[in-house]
Amino acid sequence: MTTTVVGFPRIGEHRELKRITEKYWKNNASQAELIEAATAIKEKHWNIQAQAGIDFVSAGDFSFFDNVLDTAYLLNIIPNRYRELGLNDLDQYFALARGYQDGDKSVKALPMKKWFNTNYHYIVPEINDTTEIKVTGTRLFDDVALATSKYTNVKASIVGPFTLLKLARYIGTKQAADFAAATIAAYQEIFAKLNETSIAWLQIDEPALVFDLTDEDKAFFQDIYTQLLAQEHDFKVNIQTYFGDVRDIYSTLVALPVEGLGLDLLEGKYNRELIKELGFPSDKILFAGVVNGKNIWRNEYRKTIELIKSLPVENYILSTSCSLLHVPFTTANEPNLNPDLLQHLAFAVEKLTELK
């Protein structure tokens, strides 16, 4: 069996990203210093994963603020009031996230919403009738290029088109379906750009699939992926879900021409029943979310092994139930905790060991 994680904390072991970003916002650090610090954090986190024996290092999960915002920004989903500020790329990104005030220039940040059932919040993309969805950013490709220059087995990740369009706020008369064609074309371009790299897997995050889905939603998802997956690519594709089960669309998912499906087998307990009752294709790999990415407690190996053995699945990659950004970095930085409590805890770094 091989291992990976849905995502890794990006704030840094000692909150380095928070500190350097706040210094940048206060004009106490340059953009070059911010980018240098961010690069060092990414490289350290990739190395931690590799040293822990994780088989597929995750790239694309880093963010200066929020991954939904990152994907929207990559796809040119930037309201005109932010463009009119005349800022550089990074400052325009931060203006979307936290607003901007300078003399007579003033805009509020885009609204935030709770990220499913977590304490994390995401920036809600704003799409209006004149929004032109296309690939304009480079941060994802830059991160992938850096990761693949250092590691052989790299898994890139991006928020998927269905989730992006479902979570967006629409200003005007057009709705999600009106932007489907442009969004599919943009993701096809992302496929093409990533195909020029040496990534092993592309993880497409589609947590919106755990919502209650209407027939219209299911048809919309099917149409998006029928067209997107027709794009030729050398890397393998994993459609990743978390925070619940996919009962409304399981049959559609297992029929898609992808190599992997990521299912949360802890919070999405009903996913286990779906696999047992409906089966799992022998030509696909289950990215099995068996190590809890949201809680701080040590894994119970006996239960995990029993769970894995209970499922009629031939091919696994063991993973976390969701990104590890929801837990602290490492218990090694908690010397003041009572040892009796500490022995029961597992934070992000410890969960890598649990996977291995």
Image (cartoon, helix red, strand yellow):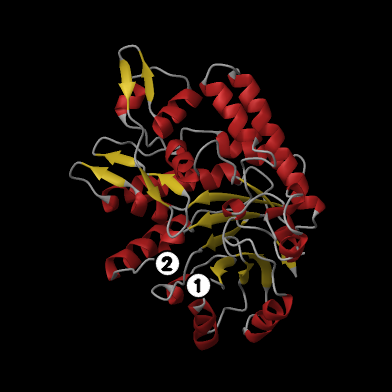
Total count of labels = 2
Residue 206 image position (x, y, % from top left): 46, 59
Residue 151 appears in the rendering: no
* 94 up-or-down from 256: above or below: above
User: Judging from the image, what secondary structure is the residue with disc 1 in?
Assistant: loop
Residue 32 image position (x, y, % from top left): 63, 20
* 281 up-or-down from 241: above or below: below
Q: Nearer the viewer, residue 313 or 299?
A: 299
Residue beneath the point at 74% across and 40% down: 44
Give the residue at the far bottom of this rendering.
277
Give the residue at the far top of this rendering.
103
Amino acid under disc 2 = Val
Q: Which residue is mark 2?
A: 210
Residue beneath the point at 62% across and 25% down: 34
Quarter of image, res 282 = bottom right
Give the residue at the far left of this rendering.
173
Quarter of image, res 69 = top left
* 30 up-or-down from 226: above or below: above
Q: In the picture, which quadrant includes the C terminus?
A: bottom right
Q: Which residue is mark 1?
A: 268
Mark 2 closeness class: few <14, some 14–19, many ≥20 residues within 10 Å? some
Asked whether the residues under the numbered discs 2 and 1 touch, taking CB atoms below 8 Å apart as contact, a structural biologist would say yes
User: Judging from the image, what secondary structure is the residue with disc 2 in?
Assistant: helix
Quarter of image, res 75 = top left
Amino acid under disc 1 = Gly
Q: Nearer the viewer, residue 62 or 108?
A: 108
Mark 1 closeness class: few <14, some 14–19, many ≥20 residues within 10 Å? many
Lateral position of residue 46 relative to residue 307, left or right: right
Q: Earlier in the sequence, mark 2 or mark 1?
A: 2
Q: In the picture, which quadrant includes the N terminus?
A: bottom right
